[in-house]
Image: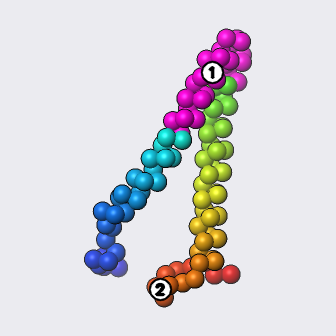
Amino acid sequence: MKPTASSAPSEDLTRQLMTLAVPVAIGIMVQTCYHLVNAFWVGRLGADALAVVTIVFPINLVIVSLGGGLALGGTILIAQRHIPVRNQKTTTLEP
C-alpha cells in the first residue's frame, strides 16, 4: 500500500502520545519510589524480609501493568461499540 499524505503521522500525533506517556511515566516513578521506601523499612527487619520485597516488586509491576492495559483496551472496545460512526471509513468492533 502506497503511503498518502493523509496516512502520514502528524506532529499533533507526537504531542498526543507525549500527553499520554508523561502521566504513565510519572505513575511508574511513583510506584518505584514506593517500593524503594518499602524496601528501606522492610530491610530493617532482616535479609529474608527484604528478599521477599525484592521478589514481589517486579511481579507487582507486571500485574499492575496488565491490569491497566486490559482496562484501557476494554475502554477502547466499549467506546468503539457504542459511539456512532461519523465516517464510513472508520472501523468499529462488530458484534
Residue 15 left/right relative to 54: left
The answer to if 31 sits in the magenta stretch is yes
Q: State the residue position of label 2.
A: 87
Q: Secondary structure at mark 1?
A: helix
Of the two numbered discs 1 and 2 on the same chain, state the one appearing first in sequence.
1
Of badges 1 and 2, nearer the viewer stands 2
Q: Amino acid at mark 1?
A: Ala
The answer to if 49 sits in the magenta stretch is yes
- Residue under the image location 55 percent in, 29 percent down: 33
Q: Which region shows up in magenta? A: 28-52
Q: Secondary structure at mark 2?
A: loop
Q: State the residue position of label 1.
A: 39
- Residue under the image location 67 percent in, 11 percent down: 44
Report the front residue among 52 and 21. 21
Q: Quadrant of the C terminus?
A: bottom right
Q: Residues within 10 Å of mark 1 (few under 14, many from 20)?
A: some
| x then y, percent, for residue 39 | 63, 21
- Residue under the image location 72 percent in, 18 percent down: 49
| x then y, percent, for residue 23 | 49, 47
Quick check: 15 above or below 84? above
Quick check: 57 above or below 75? above
Residue 56 left/right relative to 30: right
